[in-house]
Image: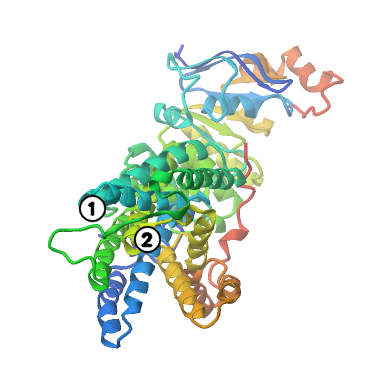
Amino acid sequence: MSHTVLQVDQLVKRFGGLVATDHCNLEIRAGEVHALIGPNGAGKTTLLAQLSGELAADSGRILFEGRDITRLPIHKRVAAGIVRSFQITTLLPRLTVRENLALAVQARTGHSFDFLGTVADESDLDQGADEAARRVGLSDVMEQIVGTLSHGRQRALELGMALACKPRLLLLDEPMAGTDPEESKRMGELIHSLRKDHTLILVEHDMDAVFRLADRISVLVAGRVIATGSPDEIRNNPQVIAAYLGDDETQSAEPIQ
Amino acid sequence: MLSRFGPGRKIETPLLIGLPGPWTAIGVALLLAIYPLVMSAIGEDFFIIVGSRILIFALAASALNLALGYGGMISLGHAAFLGTGAYAVAILAKYGIVAAWVALPVAVLAAALAACLIGAVSLRTRGVYFIMITLAFAQLFYYLAISLPEFGGDDGLPISARSVIPGLPLDGDLGFYYFVLFIAGLAFVLLYRLVASRFGRALVAIRENERRMAAIGYPIYRLKLMAFTLSGGLAGLAGALLANLSMGVTPHTLTWHQSGILMVMVIIGGSGYFWGGITGAAIFLLLEETISAHTEHWNLILGALLLFIVLVAPDGVMSLRERVLKLLRGGGPPAPEAIPAGEEKTR
């Protein structure tokens, strides 16, 4: 059995009276694709934001490879190897694809406080950008302005930005959001190909994709993980079925296959 | 091989828009060097002083441009740093320290320190709050200055002689002009290196999308604070030169009115363009100079003219070049502003 990469321990996040993350426990193993699913408002995005460092948890701990990262700012978590992508495409739309990727590489190589360093030798940035572009299939549009690309290609770049940071743990927030079936299929293949070198946490609404891609699935309801297991275990778990279909309170139930 | 990020590229993106080529820079430097000689030849010695004044404000506006244009930090308090630099020179002179090699560095450091402290607090806010808090800090400096009688209070602090460099005649207008040109020139080279460096690139990208830059591992707060501090230090240098030009400093240098003028200069010149602050300062001061020579209602006419410039070139005079090029090419790529698919969704 592979070792635990990320451990979430009794994590709590409150927004006023609302408990968005309610003593949440989660364990991510090295090399797995771990999907987080749950009805709308279950707190998936909030949890992801706490893992990436955008939101500070109110209590509880997050351990990454045994190290307590609960209070670490985003940039230190990125340096440690945790990188997220966004559900809503968050890129630098007025810049070229190459510039976007090179900026991600530059963050990794440091030197961003290098005020007077000449910008003559950029081969390291170029190489890193090329590599990430090849990975997500954007090599042909390197010099194009990002804002002029199709939505599907922007989604690919969204993932490419994260990959250019050389993460060990990737947090993907609905990578397939808004893509057409063809693009969605390609994104699925891409995610599948990443499992060799990365551990992935996948938040996704496309249940077909989740059950196809995930090694394990955790179901989040009202800020709590109610079940974790293989896709088959989750599919047949009575608690999960109830959470999605049963309760009268869960108005926003989504179909589960 | 030419870098694909360097100025050898075809597409201009915000990362390197408006960066001057070496020949432009040399040409401008040469023009500025012969300008006072021409003025003195045609007997318009007064315009040498105007030239010094324009150079000083070009430096101050460019310093603000680093924070405002490149860093997206809309500071309405840069008069505080200009004034800190000016007061540093005047206070040192009061205690008999007039050597330029002491006065100028002290002015820069004092202003940079002030910017670092103000920035450290202000950068925890954003949007309108950032504008208001920088304004509030600058007002604090203003009231501090008028409440200290030993440093002149309301009347300000005159200096009896300009900062000196042994062996150089800075007392005359011509000598002083070249001194300003030299110092400002160095500062512009520094600024160029700054905005063309990896630091400058990170800064522009943060302005474009802060959330994205945070997610790929940039320490946003530290980078912005560094830019704000450098911007304040350079404004302090301009202030030091200004105190020397006007033989003293008055609390007026610290008013929000002064901050506003710097901002107007950056906006009409082109915020985020290397020449933006310089062009803006030149246009503003030349208009002010010529109009005020003819009528006492020059403020009204100046205001109307500035409004006209902003209507013709909403992104500043320096943006006209691209707009003209785009028109000539017939359309060009679609306006980038139209694209972002909800990218500014805040947490």
Tell which residue pokes out farthest to the front in this image: B149
Q: Which residue is mark 1?
A: B98
Task: Report the front residue among B235 and A216.
Answer: B235
Spot occupied by residue A63 in the image (x, y as percentages of width and height): 48, 16
Name the secondary structure under disc 1. Answer: loop
Q: Residue sitting at 29 percent across and 74 percent down?
A: B32
Q: Residue sitting at 42 percent across and 54 percent down?
A: B156
Spot occupied by residue B114 in the image (x, y as percentages of width and height): 41, 42
Q: How many marks?
A: 2
Mark 2–mark 1 Cα distance, whole angstroms, equals 22 Å
> Is residue A239 placed above or below B16 in the rendered structure?
above
- Parent chain of label 1: B
Question: Pointers 2 and 1 in contact (CB under 8 A)?
Answer: no
> Is residue A217 placed above or below B24 in the rendered structure?
above
The quarter in which the C terminus of chain B is drawn is top right
Residue depth check, mark 2 versus mark 1: number of the one nearer the observer: 1
Q: Which residue is mark 2?
A: B59
> Is residue B32 placed above or below A181 in the rendered structure?
below
Task: Report the front residue among B103 and A187.
Answer: B103
Q: Residue sitting at 61 percent across and 57 percent down?
A: B339
Q: Is residue B10 left or right of residue A220?
A: left
> Is residue B292 placed above or below A117 in the rendered structure?
below
The quarter in which the N terminus of chain B is drawn is bottom left
Q: Amino acid at mark 1?
A: Val
Tell which residue pokes out farthest to the right in this image: A248
